Amino acid sequence: MKKIRFLLLLISIVNTNLLWGQAKPEWNDLFAKINQEVLTHSNAYNSLKIASKTIGHRTTGSVNGHKAESYTFNLLKSYGFTSLRFQPFEVESWSRGNILVKIGSDINNLKPIKRS
C-alpha cells in the first residue's frame, strides 16, 4: 500500500494539465480516482513540512542539501523500496562571495552598511 501511495504522490506532482492533454479520454476516470486518492491520503505536504522544519534551506551541494538527500533516501526506504542508490550529477553554480556596501553624500563621506 505504501508503494501505491508513493506512486500516487509522484503522479500528483506531475502537472495534471500535461497528463490530461496527452491522456486517452478513457483514462479520465482513472486519473480522477488517482487524484482523489492523492488529495485524501497523500503524505507529501507532511513530508515537505518535516523536511522544511528539520533541514531548512537546502542549496545543492551544501550540508543541508546532503541532509535533504538522506531524508529522501530514508523516506523512500520506509515506503518499502529496496533498490535505492544515489546518482551523482554536476551542477554549475555561481557564488557572489562577500561584498562591502558603503553609503554617503559623496565619495569622501562613505560609511559601511552593517550586514544583518
Image (spheres, rainbow, N blue to C red):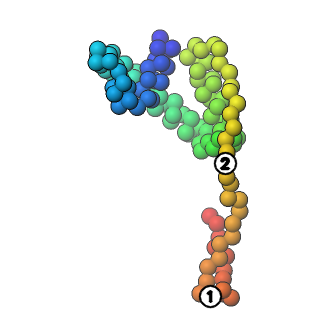
Q: Is residue 38 visible?
A: yes
In this rendering, the label closer to the viewer, 2 or 1: 2
For badge 1, the amino acid type reads Asp
Exactly how many numbered labels are in the figure?
A: 2
Q: How far apart are marks 2 and 1 (CA)?
A: 36 Å
Answer above or below: position of 100 versus 73.
Answer: below
Identity of the residue drawn at 34% across and 27% down? 21
**The C terminus: image quadrant:** bottom right
Element on which disc 1 rests: loop
Residue 50 located left or right of residue 93: left
**Residue 80 screen position, x and y as percent:** 58, 13
**Which residue lies under the disc numbered 1?**
106
Tell me, for residue 74, which label it has, or none.
none
Closest to the observer, 30 or 112 = 30
Identity of the residue drawn at 64% across and 31% down? 69
For badge 2, the amino acid type reads Ser
**Residue 71 screen position, x and y as percent:** 62, 29
**Residue 56 screen position, x and y as percent:** 59, 42
**Which residue lies under the disc numbered 2?**
93
Q: Earlier in the sequence, mark 2 or mark 1?
A: 2
Q: Residues within 10 Å of mark 2 (few under 14, many from 20)?
A: few
Identity of the residue drawn at 44% across and 29% down? 14
Q: Is residue 64 visible?
A: no
Residue 88 located left or right of residue 39: right
Identity of the residue drawn at 46% across and 32% down? 45
**Residue 111 screen position, x and y as percent:** 66, 80
Closest to the observer, 65 or 107 = 107
Element on which disc 2 rests: loop
Q: How crowded is mark 1: few (under 14 residues within 10 Å), some or many (20 or more)?
A: few
